[in-house]
Amino acid sequence: MVRFNPDAAGERLLRRFAGGTSRRGILSRLGAALVAAPVFPLLPVSRAEAAKPDRSPEAKTAFARTAQTSDDTKCNYWRYCAIDGSLCTCCGGGVHTCPAGSEPSPISWVGSCINPDDGKAYMIAYRDCCGKPACGQCGCDNTDRETQLYLPQLNNNVIWCFGTSSMEYHCSTAMMIGAA
Amino acid sequence: MKREMHGARFGLAFRLLVAGLGGAASFGLGVGSVLAQAVIAEAEEPGVNTLEPPKAGWFFVRGPWGSGGSSIFDAASGRMLGMVSTSRDSDLAIDPAGRFYYVAETMWTKGNRGTRQDLVSVYDSRTLKLLAEIPTPGRLIIGGFNTNFVLSDDGRTAYDYNFDPASSVNVIDLAKRRFVRAIELPGCASLIPNPGVGFSALCADGTIATVAIRGAGHDITRSAEFFDAAADPIFSNVVYDRRRKQAVMLSYTGKVWTATMGAAPQVSAPFSIQEAGGMRSADTSPLDIAWYPGGMQPMALHRPSNTLWVLMHKGEYWSHKEGAEEIWGVDLAAKKVVRRLPVKGHPRNIEITQDDAAMIMVNGMDNNATIIDSRTGEVKHTIENAGGGLITVFEPMAGAAQ
């Protein structure tokens, strides 16, 4: 089993971020956050996973034991282990696609979710879609390894519409980043 | 014009009279007594009420997510007294002297778009009229937390947490009603007042950071690491006791710490809330069913008796947002659970009045609130549509008469 590599996962996350965003003032602020906080953003995920390499039912959270892989409009779809908000799949979008007229946030909070089909953990970026009123459909609040505001990249209450033209929250997607 | 208005009022009085007669007929009452009650002899003028300054027996209850107001309820009567304008995802703080309500908020010039404006709105506590707006450089738009916008004990300074997405704290002079400066505070949030020093905050490395403000400068120091922010986080909604200058912190597994504020905050050894209730302590293992704290605002401190009231549910670890089945009262000095109150509706927020009546309010996703006598467990009032969000109470200044 390949061990989770936080550096590689971080590089992928940042390369995607860099490739998908324009040069804005927010980048310097984000850069400051990345440089200044040594635990930002992946070490806690790594630590949590390192402590739980065992994927037996006894080692899985209640969410992981009951997750499914067939219906991404349900709160128990496996990627949604730490999502909070309306599922974009219920709002005219997809699991990694924003509904028409909304704008994906360039950054996100993250979760580490187990796919029940292969028993492996994957890193999921919960990217908010922004700039429209709250969708209101399929509200979910899953909390596997979800933390508090001092560890914001693992907190699902923060509205991540930073760097978008409007900070209004519409819905949340669950993008695959890679194996955790 | 004046005559027409009088005519309209007499018309209204006539309609009330007819309505009164209709009601009397249906209840079989005598016409004479109805006439005495229903006739409005004088034309009325519209008026506007004022409020008393905030009291320790009031609850300020935020509506459901997205709502723009916090309703004020009197715990004794269960009646709504008024509403403070608290726009969506704003933060409310009450002047310790009871003169003002402060609302840290964010709005855009065209509703959901246009130019962003961050500010602290100042309201008179008697008239609830807007007195001033203090522009700020930004804030975390989230709501639901009592530690993103805190006041110094003397009420002269506000600390407003910002995240954009680097962490900083805006210092606001409330006496001069102006923004002073922003202090970068990477990796920390959940602000705690630190009287005579500045403020403190919980950090991702498991420490408390203390920001000592000295004139135009400041020093940031860190405590020793005392909690694991990823494995067993402390709820951001820390509660703070002005008289004891003490913060009370609660983790997902149910560990309770106190921290006495100062230049170097003194953090106590933790105790387990389950052990305080005569059970084995809970841990982070899946499939280990135990009583855990949970909710958005999972605890409330009754400062006069130093009793912590915690929303508790049975479940597995990582269920820290689940609503409560019981409320546990914990004597912080004795480190003992002194009361367990069953509660309905799976509430996610709790507060308690800061008077001898010690009335608890809980609310949750159904938007209804329940007022419970913490001494007996008796439900005193059930208030539909009271609001499902964060509850705030007024903590009078130390030594102030209430």
Image: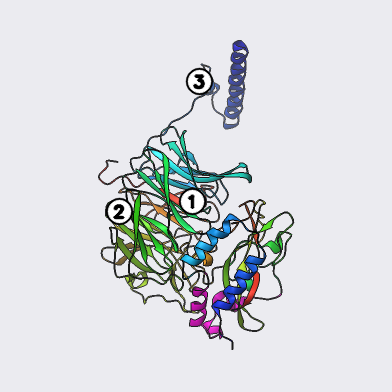
Per the image, label 1 sits on a secondary structure element best described as strand
Kindly identify the residue that appears in the image at 59 percent across and 71 percent down. Answer: A81
Lateral position of residue A140 relative to residue B305, left or right:
right
Q: Amino acid at mark 1?
A: Ala
Q: Chain of mark 3?
A: B
Q: CA distance from mark 1 to mark 3?
A: 38 Å
Q: Give the label on residue B197, or none.
A: 2
Mark 3 vs mark 2: give the one in front. 2
Classify mark 2: residues with Cα within 10 Å, few (<14), some (14-19) or many (20+). some
Per the image, label 3 sits on a secondary structure element best described as helix
Whole-percent x, y for residue B215 in the image: 32, 48
Return the disc, 1 or 3, that comes first in the chain's sequence.
3
Q: B332 above or below B103? A: below
Q: Nearer the viewer, residue A22 or B138?
A: A22
Q: Amino acid at mark 2?
A: Val
Span shown in magenta: A41-70
Q: Amino acid at mark 3?
A: Ala
